[in-house]
Amino acid sequence: MLLALLTTPVITAAEQAASSLPGIAVIDFTTVELKGHNRYELPTPVPAADALTEQLTAADRQVIDDRWLGLVKALETRTNAWLLRHRQERREKREERAQLRHEVLADRLLFGEQRPVILGADYLIAALARYPEFRVVDRKALAQALLTAPPEETPAAFAARSGVDYLLGATVSDLRTRQRRTRVYGNEVTTTTYSLDLVVQLVDLATGAIRYAGTVTVEQSELGTEFAETRNSDRFSGLLKNAVEQVAAKLHDHFVAGAAKEDRS
């Protein structure tokens, strides 16, 4: 009895309170281009079979002279060789186009305006961690739990073992611009408004149900004249950070309102 008491782990009140908080794992953000690439990319073509065409049936071969059979076989061989070469060329062209699209997309994401999307999940993790009502789970721990998951494990069992109650993902839209020109004291003033959408989904890992979904739209306006022009290389990043902060606040309000509703019931 004494040995059992000594070997039983002691769970503090803080640990028990932390385990009751919703565990959220934030996955990497995606973009409109990435979703379109994954959805509409052509599948890998199936290699063509060696025997492509035969003009004669087994019954034909029994009634046709051997010399004519040899001629037909030569024609079949030539036709098959042409078809195989033609299919191989088409396959290589498709692969070249797919590789080119992949490289263009990678360049735009790594070196283009949308580069801050790579840090989108990290921005959201930092924003959620400010709220004590959330328990943000490290993505490395989630990945390790996926690697060690047995095939027969149910989603509910995996959620309990990994400590992840919800998966949070987001899609970032393209940066949109809207311009308006006016005259102020004889000078032309251009107002450029930049807007960005962040579409989020919070999925219950145990049931697969969408617990929360919404769209946050953020805007930023800049003024310019013929004498002054604004150049801001941090525009996309600033809009993304603003959207992430609003998403974290909305999720906080959603969970707090849900908890208050349960307490009243």
Image (cartoon, helix red, strand yellow):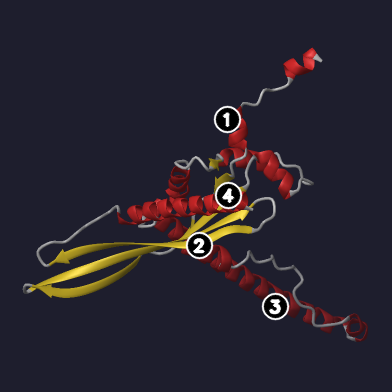
Q: CA distance from mark 1 to mark 4?
A: 19 Å
The residue tagged with tag 2: helix, strand or loop?
Answer: strand
Reading the chain from its start, which is encountered first: label 2 or label 4? 2
The extreme top residue here reads 2
Three-letter code, disc 2: Gly
User: Which of the pair 106/35 is nearer the observer?
Assistant: 35
Q: How far is the residue under mark 4 from the one under mark 3?
A: 72 Å
Indicate the amino acid at tag 3.
Answer: Thr
Mark 1, mark 4: which one is toward the viewer? 4
Which one is earlier in the sequence, the residue at label 1 or at label 2? 1
Report the residue marked by disc 1: 14
Q: Residue at x 21, y 68 (%)?
A: 191
Mark 4 vs 3, N-terminal side: 3
Name the residue beneath numbered marker 2. 214
Residue 25 visible to the viewer: yes
Task: Identify the residue under disc 4.
Answer: 259
